[in-house]
């Protein structure tokens, strides 16, 4: 029960890594807000773990504000924020990605971190404590061709994590990131372009441990970084990638 009596918001928690993190946090004693753009998916996970469901578009100012107000209204504080929601564009040459695709990727993967900070950091400062975890990617460290603007958005997130950590440390707020390799989530097909045995083999050949990451892998790492056990850990971008970035 390493998160006993803690309160946590996990965005993009209706499926994939976010759902795995939400389940583990709840199992460890946290009260969890399952936030997702898919309200039905959020409700299903929230019902399963005894949490609160919240429909949110993490790229929308008013939507993020409503999420923050709902959490603070329910609990009076937010101890943990996991910025997990993310999207990608389909593999293509960088110059062929449309402006709309570019804008959407940067809005969901980058602007969302700014918006959640804007609406939740003040309450964490008032409390003198907090843990923020940004789910970045190995793509921000070792980019794959044809995913250029997704790579860039995750590199932005890693730098934002470090900048946030330095600024917020005096207020007792820790900020870290996870860099997962491609995993068994709804985004996997989008990364590969097509889900075929050949394409899976190509991706797996770049991962020394020979498998994709799982929601459980992310949940285990997230649990440590968001728990009091990591009280001296901030500004870290931890790779959970089976050796991909070596």
Image (cartoon, helix red, strand yellow):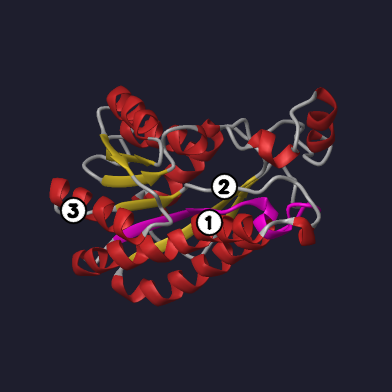
Disc 3/disc 2 C-alpha distance (Å)? 27 Å
Q: Earlier in the sequence, mark 2 or mark 1?
A: 2
Determine which residue is flagged by label 1: 109
Disc number for residue 72: 3
For the question of whether residue 162 can be seen, the reply is: yes
Q: Is residue 206 left or right of residue 230?
A: right
Magenta stretch? 130-150
Q: Quadrant of the N terminus?
A: top left
State the residue position of label 2.
87
| N-terminal-most mark, 3 or 2 | 3
Who's the residue at 33% across and 52% down the image?
80
Could you say where residue 183 lies in the image, as x and y percent from the top left? 63, 35
> Which numbered mark, 3 or 2, is in the foreground of this view?
2
Which of the 4 quarters of the picture holds residue 195? top right
The percent coordinates of residue 48 (x first, y second) are 32, 22
How many residues crowd around disc 3 within 10 Å: few (fewer than 14), some, or many (20 or more)? Answer: some
Q: Residues within 10 Å of mark 2 (few under 14, many from 20)?
A: some
User: Residue at 77% across / 39% down in the picture?
Assistant: 207
Asked if the residue at tag 1 contacts the one at tag 2, i.e. Cβ–Cβ closer than 8 Å, the answer is yes
Residue 66 painted magenta: no
Q: Position of residue 33 (x, y in %)?
A: 29, 41
């Amino acid at each position: 029960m390493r998160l006993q009596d803690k309160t946590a918001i996990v965005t993009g928690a209706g499926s994939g890594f976010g759902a795995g993190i939400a389940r583990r946090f709840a199992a460890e004693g946290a009260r969890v807000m399952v936030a997702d753009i898919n309200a039905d998916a959020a409700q299903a996970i929230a019902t399963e773990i005894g949490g609160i469901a919240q429909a949110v578009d993490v790229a929308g100012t008013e939507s993020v504000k409503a999420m923050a107000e709902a959490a603070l209204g329910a609990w009076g504080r937010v101890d943990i924020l996991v910025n997990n929601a993310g999207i990608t564009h389909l593999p293509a040459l960088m110059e062929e990605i449309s402006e709309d695709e570019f804008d959407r990727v940067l809005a969901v993967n980058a602007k969302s971190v700014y918006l959640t900070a804007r609406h939740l950091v003040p309450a964490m400062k008032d409390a003198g404590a907090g843990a923020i975890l940004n789910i970045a990617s190995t793509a921000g460290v070792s980019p794959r061709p044809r995913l250029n603007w997704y790579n860039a958005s995750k590199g932005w997130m890693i730098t934002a994590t470090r900048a946030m950590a330095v600024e917020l440390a005096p207020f007792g707020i820790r900020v870290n990131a996870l860099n997962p390799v491609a995993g068994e989530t709804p985004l996997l097909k989008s990364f590969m372009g097509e889900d075929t045995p050949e394409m899976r083999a190509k991706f797996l050949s770049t991962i020394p441990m020979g498998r994709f990451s799982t929601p459980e892998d992310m949940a285990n790492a997230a649990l440590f970084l968001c728990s009091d056990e990591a009280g001296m850990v901030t500004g870290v971008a931890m790779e959970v990638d089976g050796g991909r970035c070596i």
